[in-house]
Amino acid sequence: MAELIMDITLTVNGEPVSERVEARKTLVDFVRDDLGLTGSHVGCEHGVCGACTMRVDGEIVRGCLMLAVQCDGATVETIEGLSDQGEVADLQAAFEQRNALQCGFCTPGMVTAAQAILLQAKASGTVPSREEIREHISGNYCRCTGYHAIVDAVETVAKARAGAKA
């Protein structure tokens, strides 16, 4: 049985992309295998671990649960794009300073998820509590840090962006 191949056009990290893809190829496999953007990791492949977290049209998604063809016409941002644009530079620095990196496997998805709550906080003019940060990143598994250092890093950036003392 022949594989269904479809043409898609989207924007990935600010660059226009037109490709032919298998209809059943996941977004994370597309950006990793076809575009060579390997920052988003493949973990559980069930949408549970958060290692494949990226943004599609401004919303965080699990790249293993979304098909590449669903992104036809969309704007996709991977950790490479967020990093290259400098959008998460302070968050990445805080992860390093607070020792929230450890093995690094979860870090791209964790930073992408953390940036989402920081953007929500900015829009509402609030600083998320430690409990809100924990709840927001709870869909991203980390086996190394115990989350305390990650929450510290996100809280530090949230306060700094709001102009409060860390």
Image (tube, rainbow, N blue to C red):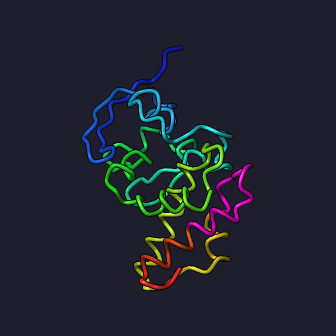
Q: Position of residue 75 (x, y in %)?
A: 33, 50
- Viewer-side residue, 165 vs 67: 165
Q: Residue at x 47, y 85 (%)?
A: 164
Report the predominant secondary structure element of the magenta stretch.
Answer: loop
Above or below, 97 against 27 in this view is below
Q: Position of residue 56 (x, y in %)?
A: 41, 53
Q: Residue at x 51, y 42 (%)?
A: 40
Horizontal side of 163 relative to 26 (left or right) equals: left
Residue located farthest toward the top when viewing the structure as drawn = 1
**Residue 106 colored in magenta in the image:** no
Above or below, 9 against 96 in this view is above
Number of marks: 0
Horizontal side of 145 relative to 16 (left or right) equals: right
Q: Position of residue 69 (x, y in %)?
A: 42, 38
Q: Position of residue 2 (x, y in %)?
A: 49, 15
**Residue 143 colored in magenta in the image:** yes
Magenta region, residue range: 138-153
Q: Residue at x 55, y 60 (%)?
A: 97
